Image (spheres, rainbow, N blue to C red):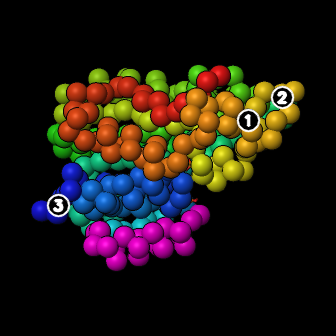
Amino acid sequence: MTSGSYGGKVVVVTGGSSGIGAAVVGRFAREGASVVIGYNRGAHEADYLKEELEATGTPCVAVKADVSKTRELEQLMDRAVDRFGRIDVLAACAGISHFGSLSTLTPEAVDHVFAVNTRGQLLAAQHAAERMTAGGRIILTSSNATRRAVFEHGLYAASKAAIDAMVRCLSVELGPRGITINAVAPGATATAMVANNAARYQPPGMNLSAEEWLSVSHALDRIATPDEVAGAYTFLAGKDAAYISGRTLPVESCVF
Ligand SMILES: NC(=O)c1ccc[n+]([C@@H]2O[C@H](COP(=O)([O-])OP(=O)(O)OC[C@H]3O[C@@H](n4cnc5c(N)ncnc54)[C@H](OP(=O)(O)O)[C@@H]3O)[C@@H](O)[C@H]2O)c1
C-alpha cells in the first residue's frame, strides 16, 4: 500500500492536461494515488505531466479522451481498470468556456458547449459509476457563473447549472451503492480559461483593466490558484466528506 491519504486509490481526472485538472492530478498524486490523466488536445502537456509524476514514483497513465465522444469516455474508464484494476475516484474537470451574445449563438455552439460541459460530465459519471464499488467518489465541475449575471455568458452558465441539478438527483441513485457524487464550483481561477477571457467578466460599461477588475471583484483581492481549487476535489474524495453527497461546493471569494 502506497503512503498518503490516497495510497492505493485509483483516480481518473478528465481534463487532467492543464489548469485545474492538472492541479487535481498533482494533489492526488502527492497524496499517493495512482492517476489516470484524461486529455483531449493536450497530448504533449499530459505526457509531460505523466513523466514528471512517474519520476516521483506515481503510477500514472495518460489517455486521449474527448469527453464529447461517448466511446472515448468508455475507453478512458476501461484503460483505468485495465491498468490499475478499478476506479475509486472520478474528478471530471474537462470543460470549455463560451462568451457570445444571444443574437450570435448558433445551434452548433449550443450543442458543443453542452456536449463537453454537461453531457460529457453526465456520461463520465455513468461510465465511472458502472466500474465503482462502495466507497466510490464522483466529483464534477460546476462554476460560480451559475449564480452570477455575467454579460454574454448564458450558454456556459446554463451548461454548468445543469451540473448542480445533476449531482443532487444522481446522489439519490448512487447513495444506496455507497458512492457519493458532488460538484466543485470554482470562481475565477488562474488558468488559460481565465487568461483568454479576463476582460469579459466585468459588467458592460465598467472599463477597468482585466487585472483591476479581477482584484476589486474578489474579497481576497485576487483570483484563486488552480491548487487552491484542487484542494476541494481531494476534500470531497476523502474521509472527512464521507457524509456529503448531492452538493456543490463553491471555491471562490467573488463579491458581486
Ligand atoms: N478557470 C476558471 O476560472 C474556472 C471557473 C469556474 C469553472 N471552471 C471549470 O473548471 C474546469 C477546468 O477549467 P480550467 O480553468 O482549468 O481551463 P483550462 O486550463 O482551459 O483546461 C480545460 C481542460 O479541459 C479539457 N478539455 C476541453 N475540452 C475537452 C474535451 N472535449 N474532451 C476532454 N477534455 C477537454 C482540456 O484538455 P486539452 O487541453 O487536453 O484539450 C483541459 O485539460 C472546466 O470545467 C471549467 O469550466 C473554471
- On the image, which quarter does residue 110 sit in? top right
Q: Is residue 195 left or right of residue 182?
A: right
Q: Which residues are magenta?
A: 41-59
Label 1: few (<14), some (14–19) or many (≥20) C-alpha neighbours in 10 Å: many
Are discs 2 and 1 less than 8 Å apart at CB? yes
The amino acid type, in three-letter code, at marker 1 is Trp
Q: Determine the CA span between mark 2 and mark 1.
A: 9 Å
Are discs 3 and 2 less than 8 Å apart at CB? no
Where does label 1 land, which residue? 213
Question: Residue 206, which numbered label?
Answer: 2
The amino acid type, in three-letter code, at marker 2 is Met
Which residue does the image show at 69% across and 50% down from the upper left?
Answer: 195
Local secondary structure at mark 1: helix
N-terminal of the two: label 1 or label 3?
3
The amino acid type, in three-letter code, at marker 3 is Ser
Question: Residue 3, which numbered label?
Answer: 3
Local secondary structure at mark 3: loop
Are discs 1 and 3 less than 8 Å apart at CB? no
- Viewer-proximal residue among 96 and 112: 96
- Label 3 beta carbon within 8 A of ligand 1: no
Q: Is residue 45 magenta?
A: yes
Q: Is residue 11 left or right of residue 40?
A: left
Q: Determine the CA span between mark 3 and mark 2.
A: 50 Å
- Label 1 beta carbon within 8 A of ligand 1: no
